[in-house]
Image: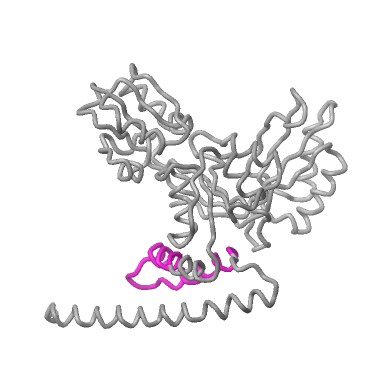
Amino acid sequence: MARPLPELRTIVDQIDDELIGLLERRASLVDEVASAKREAGLPLHDPDRERLVLERLGARAKGKFPAPAIEAVYREIMSACLALQQPMAVAYLGPEGTFSHMAARSLFGLGVRYVELPTIAAVAEAVRRGQVEYGVAPIENSTEGSVSYTLDCLLDGGVYLRREWILPVEQALLSRAPSLASITRVVSHPQAFGQCREWLGRHLPHAQLVHASSTAAAAREAASDPCAAAIASRLAAELHGLPVLVPAVQDRSENATRFVLLAKEDSRPTGSDRTTMAFSLRDGKGALRHVLEVFETEGVNLSRIESRPSREKAWDYVFIVDLEGHREDAHVARAIVELEQRCPIVRVFGSYPKAQKPA
């Protein structure tokens, strides 16, 4: 027989009081931790340490409280404690409600100062100039492929990849229109249109497609036009007071975007890393094949390769690759040295822990 409800609530209140007491004890150590870091010449924020703590705590989830919820709770605890040590600023492609905003909150919680910027280039520049500690930018979508704006920022230099984060993306159709038949134009970011191309062709073939700087900016624009709709997140719908007319309009149910953390330096080796880099080719028959042989010889696995126009000369191209391993791993380091002998341009954009793919 279940215990009486008042008794159960009293026990829950006692546990909550104990949790508050433990949080206070944790927070009281923050100043000591900060002092120890300063004396050792270490940065106050250590994302590698945070990642290890979250992984350890998530692995201890054996009971009814799920691991993702444990990680979410502790991310907020660490975010609040970090704010006590040092206020930190993180830039993202704004306005509020973009998927970049959602990724940033997933990475840092609510205890940091978020800076919304109008373009990915502005996010990268804020990191370069030291106006923010980190920037969050999309680099690849599972439906539409690479985000060229972010790749171009990496080619411009001055920022490195510190971490990656994979965010499941559900695109929703937001509108004040009473039905699909009333919609004359749809506003969104080009990447979102690409993710919903088939759905739009089936359900809104005659609507005008209008590009916006972000999905959240699209929601803001659609909010003032009863004949317009936006493709954006549910968070954008809440922030801009727009009804969700149709949920999940993306063409692929497993749609996800890979975000990267831009910083002034990359991450230390973890044993499960990825490196992103670029190289150019000298003119000659079989030039690309000869370069790719370097990776094969050293046993380096490439998980992605693509070409982008060079930032230095018209009609020249650079190849951007993701490879398994850290730049300090012996076989990866040897491959980079050999590439530097064969290629006019070799740039390592950063090594960072591999993110877990969503289930």
Q: Is residue 48 magenta?
A: yes
Q: Judge whether 343 appears above or below 179 on screen.
A: below
State the residue in front, 290 or 4.
Answer: 4
> x and y percent of residue 21 in the render?
37, 82
Which residue does the image show at 25% across and 27% down from the upper left?
226
Which residue does the image show at 30% across and 45% down from the upper left?
238
Q: Judge whether 30 appears above or below 278 on screen.
A: below
Please state if 84 lies on the left or on the right of 72 as rendered.
right
> x and y percent of residue 307 in the render?
68, 32
Which residue does the image show at 73% across and 29% down from the upper left?
317
State the residue in front, 315 or 158.
Answer: 158
Q: Judge whether 78 appears above or below 306 on screen.
A: below
Q: Is residue 67 magenta?
A: yes
Q: Can you name the residue that lies furthest to the top here?
A: 206
State the residue in front, 144 or 260.
Answer: 260
The image quadrant of residue 170 is top left
- The rendered magenta stretch, by its main secondary structure, is classed as helix
> x and y percent of residue 121 in the render?
60, 39
> x and y percent of residue 264 in the render?
67, 54
Please state if 147 lies on the left or on the right of 202 as rendered.
right
Query: From which residue to which does the magenta span run?
Result: 47-76
Please state if 281 lies on the left or on the right of 160 as rendered.
right
